[in-house]
Amino acid sequence: MTNREAAVPEVLFVCVHNAGRSQMAAALLTQHACGAVTVRSAGSAPTDQINPAVVTAMAEVGIDLSDQVPTKLNTEDVVACDVVITMGCGDACPIYPGKRYLDWDLPDPAGLPLERVRPIRDQIDAKVTALLAELNQPDPSSSGHR
């Protein structure tokens, strides 16, 4: 059974390095969704490690990113997802019909000190919470029958 048949939406977060914004968004959505959403993250040009200030900022809210590794964006990830959220990857993200694309305009935490990463984390958390509420709404085009 696919996730679509099981009515579990898949969300892909994409940023350039997959070391900050997309990692925070994926971790926050995973935590808030409690299994109701399948979450992925990737980067168009991933770096070799998660931004240390991002790891610390997320640890402050009880999320451990210390074992996460940036991942390269691939076509299969985009094809598998229902919603693709870009965060500064520009034209590097492939476009496929039938996918919902959102672009979240957020500052890049690369090179920023912890006190400037926290507000970015909080902005992402607010966006993720709103997205989750939207994803949990019943589809009005669905009659509820299979």
Image (cartoon, grey):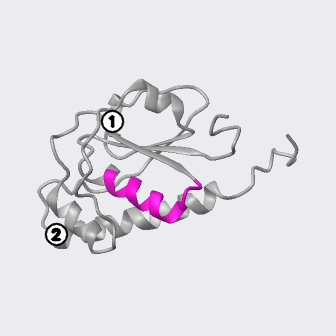
- Residue bounds of the magenta highlight: 23-36
- Residue drawn at x 22%, y 61% as measured from the top left: 54
Q: Nearer the viewer, residue 101 or 121?
A: 121
Q: Is residue 32 above or below residue 14?
A: below
- Would you say the magenta stretch is mainly helix, strand or loop? helix
Residue kind at label 1, given as amino acid type: Gly
Q: Quadrant of residue 120?
A: bottom left
- Could you say where residue 43 lies in the image, as x and y percent from the top left? 29, 38
Residue kind at label 2, given as amino acid type: Leu
**Disc 2 secondary structure class:** helix
> Which of disc 2 and disc 1 is earlier in sequence?
1
- The residue at which mark 1 appears reads as 90
Other residues around mark 2 within 10 Å, as few (<14) / some (14–19) / many (≥20): some
- Could you say where residue 27 lies in the image, as x and y percent from the top left? 38, 57
* Left or right position of 115 against 96: left
- Residue 114, numbered circle: 2
Q: Nearer the viewer, residue 145 or 1?
A: 1
User: Real-space Cα distance between discs 1 and 2?
Assistant: 26 Å
